[in-house]
Image (cartoon, coloured by chain):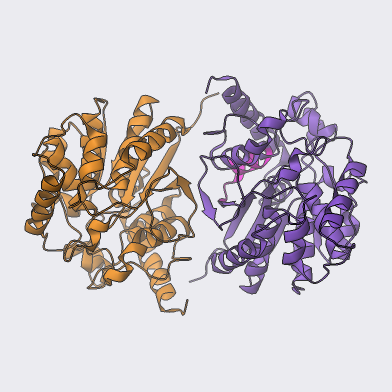
Chain colours: A purple, B orange
Amino acid sequence: MTRTPRTLFALAAGTTRTAGIDGISAAGADPALLSHTPSADAEIFEYGHPVRSPVVPVSPTGCPTPAVVTRAVRDCLGFDSIVVDAGLAEPTGAPTVDVDAAPGADVREAVAVADAERTFANARRLGTELPVDRLVLGETIPGGTTTAMGVLAALGERREVSSSLPENPLALKRDVVRAGLEASGLDPGGLAGQPTEAVRRMGDPVLATLSGLAVGALEADTDVVLAGGTQLAAVAALVRHAGRNDSLALATTSFVADDESAGIRDLAADLALDLTVTDPGFEANESHPAMAAYRAGEAKEGVGMGGALALADEAGVEMAAVRDALVSVYDRVTETAEEPR
Amino acid sequence: MTRTPRTLFALAAGTTRTAGIDGISAAGADPALLSHTPSADAEIFEYGHPVRSPVVPVSPTGCPTPAVVTRAVRDCLGFDSIVVDAGLAEPTGAPTVDVDAAPGADVREAVAVADAERTFANARRLGTELPVDRLVLGETIPGGTTTAMGVLAALGERREVSSSLPENPLALKRDVVRAGLEASGLDPGGLAGQPTEAVRRMGDPVLATLSGLAVGALEADTDVVLAGGTQLAAVAALVRHAGRNDSLALATTSFVADDESAGIRDLAADLALDLTVTDPGFEANESHPAMAAYRAGEAKEGVGMGGALALADEAGVEMAAVRDALVSVYDRVTETAEEPR
């Protein structure tokens, strides 16, 4: 009996205190509510709107979380999924797989992810055991592009990273990473070939989880699609520094690919990644507040948005259908936000 | 815009030390592996075969867990689902929603579920918040018919219960429940109108979780289908004793309905439940080991099997298609069992 190849979309949701540094993240209008963002994203991803979380993640200017785009694709297409608790700090109503991850510390401390080794090992075992043919990996972690830069620096890779803000605060991120390297007693490239240690010193628990899942899946001959921008490129770097030279896909959005500060094409070339860029065609619905915000450079990527768009494209779902679904998800999510909870 | 009514299948998976009493449960051939059964069931339910769990749950005579039937329906039909961690004792690779439940104690102790109140409250909130139109509730907990009998006794309801064994060890269960009532200082009916206390004294964490989910869902005007046999009837009793008189469906298998020791029809009538009985027609494939075992009276129900069959029937899926899918799931699951893990 021939079997349909099975695809599983795994979202790693976690937190790092790095997100609390002023000016680092747009993932949540109110800094006090930032730590709820990944818990809410997991709920939108799984259910279509927040369940337990008290907030709908929006940027300071009102741009909704990319979870609404990924969910819109899911409403069109349907796909199997899991959420992995990669260090959530707040409760979520979404079902999560446990890999014993804890919230990450501020990357400016000597140790950013105390449990990196254990989380990596647990995620690697899970990646080996998942009974699928293709694993699509996405992330939600506020502050994650800064820790991605930290890991790229520790590994000695090119360290341009994207941002959820229209103006990428690259100078601030560089300062933070410099402080982190110093606190860790590291020079750039000082942890080349030591991916878990690079995460422990300079990363976040989502990077530990995703690199573990990717390495485990590759060991089990499962195809891996890294669904995201520079954070997922950092995962690719960790996989390469773990000695895996398998073919590896990176599926991101046109918003990241068009962001010159992010240098995603160069990073993908350095790491021998098969890059797919999908443009959801938001210019066709420019009057919609969510699509206008993405067109203005907000959010750009996250919650596996680029990978979800690529899955839609692969399945022959028109981007116009995705945009229609996005309008519905946006209405549902913002309606939730206005109800008393 | 009109919306398709959304159905969500929620499986509560937990443990009680009551299952360790000699002769009580068939859910797992090896008593030492019994505590893995709900973790493995959750994996089969979510992925189609065990992932992290070291065992495939089979009865002493080789009858596979009803999770394979529910999964077979899922392979035919597709439905949204969550697993709720209702006191798992072993790790599971399935994603789970956390309601802060812990494994239950032996029902012969004074307190069987120390955290019944908190688990009920958390599950009730989750039940209120799940954004669905219909919630289908199933269970996996070895020893669960004995704790169901305990709760029915404490509430003063009819206390015939089903069994996963062909010969229902009713005398043993009655002795256990009598010892439990005595240890709790209770007469039968002593906790009528006090459902959470009845669970705390005489139940298990799955009953706390499912009664909370059901009450919360009803409060939010969500339809509730109790997918199972006497354990789910005990959940219905808890809902009634919590003062909810809403219409409430119980969907079970012909194997439970045909079990005279279980008295499911009388229990359903007592509790004003809308009873659906679905016969998967296993006599058509009598040479298959799994279907032959169910025909011989093993397992009978569990992991929402009766509710899953009812969903298939409602969707116009032929039972012949379900049986074909069952053969595939059985092969996949037993193949897993033979691989070194």
Q: Residue A338 lies in what quarter of the image?
A: top right
Please say whether residue A62 is visible from this viewpoint.
yes
Give coordinates of residue A97: x percent, y percent. 53, 54
- Quarter where residue B187 is shown: top left
Relative side of A232 to B26, left or right? right
Give yes or no for residue B199 being in the magenta stretch: no
Residue B49 x, y percent position in the rendering:
44, 65
Q: Where A72 falls versus A179 (above or below)?
A: above
Front-most of B185 and A142? B185
Residue B122 picture location, percent across and down:
41, 36
Per the rendered image, the range of residues in magenta is A69-80
Residue A108 or residue A163, whichever sits in front = A108
* Residue nearest the viewer, comparing B17 with A47: B17
Whether B284 is drawn above or below B237: the answer is below
Residue at 79 percent across and 40 percent down: it is A300
- Front residue of this view, candidates B156 and A134: B156
Confirm whether the magenta stretch covers residue A71. yes
Q: Report the residue at 16% width, 38% height from top.
A: B268
Is residue B79 visible in this depiction of the protein? no
Q: Taken as a whole, is the magenta stretch helix, strand or loop?
A: helix
Residue visible at 78% across and 23% down in the picture: A287
Q: What is the x, y in percent for residue A3?
A: 52, 67
Query: Which picture quadrant has residue B72?
Result: bottom left
